[in-house]
Amino acid sequence: MSELRAPAGGPLTLKDVLDLRAYERQRDDFRREVIAAKRLRRVRLGPLLSAVFENRLTVRFQVQEMVRAERMISDEQVQGELDAYNPLLPGPGELSLTLFLELTSEEELREWLPKLVGIERSLVLRVGTGDEALEVRGEVEAGHASQLTRDEVTASVHYVRIPLTAEGRTRFLGDPVTLVADHPAYRHEVVLRPETRASLVADWD
């Protein structure tokens, strides 16, 4: 799978995307690798939300799958996908996540999409506990916010990044880390598993 590993740092480029035939030869192995990674990087936040912490592996997979699904063969088409997905890459010391509303019925959609307007701005990462805890509120990715933010109903997918200071990154290594939703209509939190934290810290290396 070495051919499908993007080099660390910087945006993905055309050189990082395999053509359709080459990708088909490696797709099964690549999908297994991504599924295993997402198993570590997906967290459930209460009954209705889940979040996947993105990195170069997961973002590259999304690009490759879009190129495959749309049968893209021109550099211009592929570059369009790279331009759309590169903003999901975390910057140095950042966390970047895709937030999913797990609504499966028409009744749930009608009830919760209006209630959860602004949910993308309700995520907080808490590092540590008690009075000494460090809390960082997530920031909505600007380009996607202009497309997904609505006044009456929320979208089912949002993109959020959480910038951490040097202190925050240091404490992330040893202190409990909690992902919190503090939306007025939806208050839940989950402590990240040690293996999830380890996967995220590996991105910083």
Image (cartoon, rainbow, N blue to C red):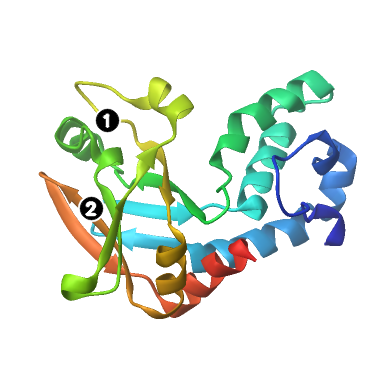
Looking at the image, which is closer to me, 201 or 47? 201
Give residue 129's position: percent from left, percent from top. 23, 75
For residue 131, side relative to residue 159 (left or right): left
Is residue 11 rendered to the left or right of residue 172? right
Viewer-side label of 2, 1? 2
Disc 2 marks a residue whose amino acid type is Ala
Q: Front-most of 66 and 120?
A: 120
Q: Do residues under tags 2 and 1 come within 8 Å of each other at their CB atoms?
A: no
Can residue 14 be seen here? The reply is: yes
Give the x, y percent position of residue 204. Answer: 60, 62
Q: Quadrant of residue 154?
A: top left
Q: Give residue 113's position: percent from left, percent from top.
A: 22, 33
Q: Secondary structure at mark 2?
A: strand
Residue at position x 65%, y 66% in the image: 205
Query: What amino acid type is highlighted by mark number 1?
Result: Thr
Q: Furthest-left residue in view?
A: 184
Give the residue number, with chain letter if any, for mark 1.
Answer: 154
Mark 2 Cα shell of 10 Å, populated few (<14), some (14-19), many (≥20): many
Q: Nearer the viewer, residue 26 or 56?
A: 56
